[in-house]
Amino acid sequence: MELSLQTRAVADHTVLEVGGEIDVYTAPRLRERLHELVDAGAHRILVDMQRVEFLDSTGLGVLVGVLKRLRTHNGGLALICTHERILKIFRITGLERVFDIYPSVSAATQAANLGAAARPPGPGRATPGDSSDGDGPDSPADPGTGTSATTIRTDVGGTHRSAPAPRPGDAAPAAGGPPPEHPTVDDGGAPTPPGS
């Protein structure tokens, strides 16, 4: 599928409307266009992803790279997206704590928190590429607690699996056992309901 890129100005923001698929084949075009905008002096960019049908890790890398570049200019990049399948990618990767994501361009332009100068990273807000305190995109923090939201990453059969860390207020797991919300397996291989 093709990637469509259209630019317009809204207030003091540059809006880049993206449509189609952002993948290994189309991400270089997106990167090039975003770099052109930054080089032309656009430092408050909104990427409207309402017409994006697919986003892979290459596309995520482009967005993180441009955000880092904009922050060196005291600028910022926010995303416009309401599609659950795309938002889920940002949640799974922890990047919803890195990017400001709004439901509409008007909501984003009304928010006064775009850009590093207006919105410094705070508790639970990671800075792209900064994982020295466990708050980077690979180890997102639980907002308000500073604790890691993902504690286990294992490679099983070529796929990464993550397990959520207990949050404040969760019931403590039994000594040596799994958390109560996770079923255990008895000797016969059948799941045993929690609390049995």
Image (tube, rainbow, N blue to C red):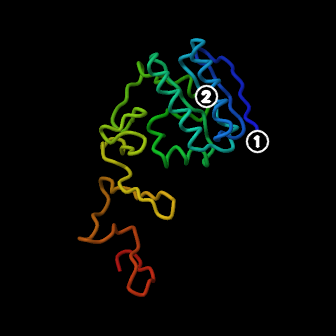
Determine whether, in the image, residue 73 is placed left or right of residue 168.
Answer: right
Identify whether 123 is placed above or below 88: above
Question: 115 or 58, which is in the foreground?
Answer: 58
Residue type at tag 1 = Met
* Other residues around mark 2 within 10 Å, as few (<14) / some (14–19) / many (≥20): some
Residue type at tag 2 = Arg
Q: Secondary structure at mark 1?
A: loop
Mark 2 sits on what residue?
A: 31
Q: Residue furthest right?
A: 1
* Other residues around mark 1 within 10 Å, as few (<14) / some (14–19) / many (≥20): few
Mark 1 sits on what residue?
A: 1
Q: Residue furthest left?
A: 175
Quarter of image, res 18: top right
Q: Position of residue 79 (x, y in %)?
A: 57, 32
Q: How many numbered discs?
A: 2
Q: Position of residue 144 (x, y in %)?
A: 33, 41
Identify whether 26 is placed above or below 43: below
x 44%, y 19%: residue: 72
Quadrant in the picture for the C terminus: bottom left
x 52%, y 43%: residue: 90
Q: Residue furthest top?
A: 41
Identify whether 129 is placed above or below 41: below
Determine whether, in the image, residue 166 is placed left or right of residue 98.
Answer: left
Question: 159 or 46, which is in the foreground?
Answer: 159
Q: Position of residue 138 (x, y in %)?
A: 41, 44
Q: Position of residue 146 (x, y in %)?
A: 30, 42
x 74%, y 31%: residue: 4
